[in-house]
Image (cartoon, rainbow, N blue to C red):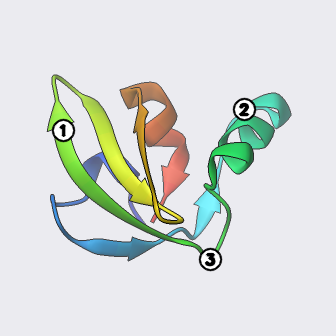
Amino acid sequence: MMPLTMAKVGEANSIKKIGGKEETKKFLATLGFVQGSNVTVVSQISGNVIVNVKESRVAISREMANKIMI
């Protein structure tokens, strides 16, 4: 397992675990970041990450991406 920030651009991964406070987990779940869903990193710009998750593109901060384990 590794954080989402370590994923290579264009590589499809499956979400294994989501860490952080309960409110953070709920926020990420509303964006589509749930255990078992597929996520692909589109690009990384100064630590922030743009990903494809559940047919949508979402930009998240490095702190949020570090809580998502793949």
Q: Are marks 3 and 1 in contact (CB under 8 Å)?
A: no
Q: Amino acid at mark 2?
A: Thr
Tell which circle, 3 or 1, labels the residue nearer the N-terminal end.
Answer: 3
Residue appearing at x 18%, y 38% in the figure = 44
Residue 9 found in image quarter? bottom left
Q: Amino acid at mark 3?
A: Gly
Q: Position of residue 12 (x, y in %)?
A: 31, 75
Residue appearing at x 54%, y 42% in the figure = 67
How much space separates mark 2 and mark 1, taking CA atoms? 21 Å
Secondary structure, mark 2, is helix
Mark 1 lies on residue: 44
Mark 3 lies on residue: 36
How many numbered discs, if any?
3
Residue in front for this viewpoint, 3 or 60? 60
Tell which circle, 2 or 1, labels the residue nearer the N-terminal end.
Answer: 2
How much space separates mark 2 and mark 3, taking CA atoms? 18 Å
Tell which circle, 2 or 3, labels the residue nearer the N-terminal end.
Answer: 2
Name the mark on residue 24. 2
Residue in front for this viewpoint, 65 or 42? 42
Residue appearing at x 66%, y 42% in the figure = 28
Give the quadrant of the C terminus: bottom left
Name the mark on residue 19. none
